[in-house]
Image (spheres, rainbow, N blue to C red):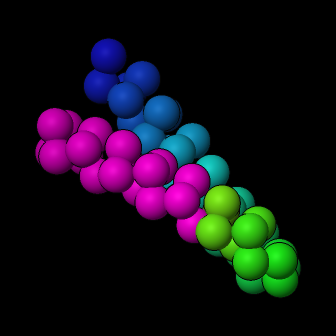
Amino acid sequence: MKADNTEAMARIQQSIDSIEKRMRVDSNDLDYETHLRQKRQLQQILDRMKAKNP
C-alpha cells in the first residue's frame, strides 16, 4: 500500500510540474487562474499525503 501511495504522490507531483510549465506559456488571465487553482488543489492533496505517510 505504501508503494501505491508513493506512486500516486509521484503522479501528483508530475501533474503539478506540468501545470507550472503551462502557466509559463499561458498569457490569458483566465487560463493562468485556472492552472493556479488546479496547482494549489494538487499541492494540498500532495501535502496531506506526505503528512500521513512520513
Q: Residue lying furthest front in this view?
A: 30
Tell me if residue 12 can be seen.
yes
In the depicted structure, whether residue 45 falls above or below residue 47? above
Q: Is residue 27 left or right of residue 9?
A: right
Q: What residue is at 48 percent from the left and 33 percent from the top?
A: 8
Question: Viewer-proximal residue, 40 or 21?
Answer: 40
Q: What residue is at 76 percent from the left and 66 percent from the top?
A: 31
Q: Is residue 44 left or right of residue 28?
A: left
Q: What residue is at 57 percent from the left and 41 percent from the top?
A: 11
Secondary structure mostly seen in the magenta stretch: helix
Quarter containing the C terminus:
top left
In the depicted structure, whether residue 31 falls above or below residue 53? below
Find the magenta span and give its range: 36-54
Quarter containing the N terminus:
top left
Residue 24 is situated, as x and y percent measured from the top left of the image, at 75, 82
Q: Is residue 50 left or right of residue 30?
A: left
Q: What residue is at 83 percent from the left and 83 percent from the top?
A: 27
Question: Viewer-proximal residue, 42 or 4?
Answer: 42
**Count of numbered circles in the view:** 0
Q: Is residue 40 left or right of residue 39?
A: left
Q: Quadrant of residue 17?
A: bottom right
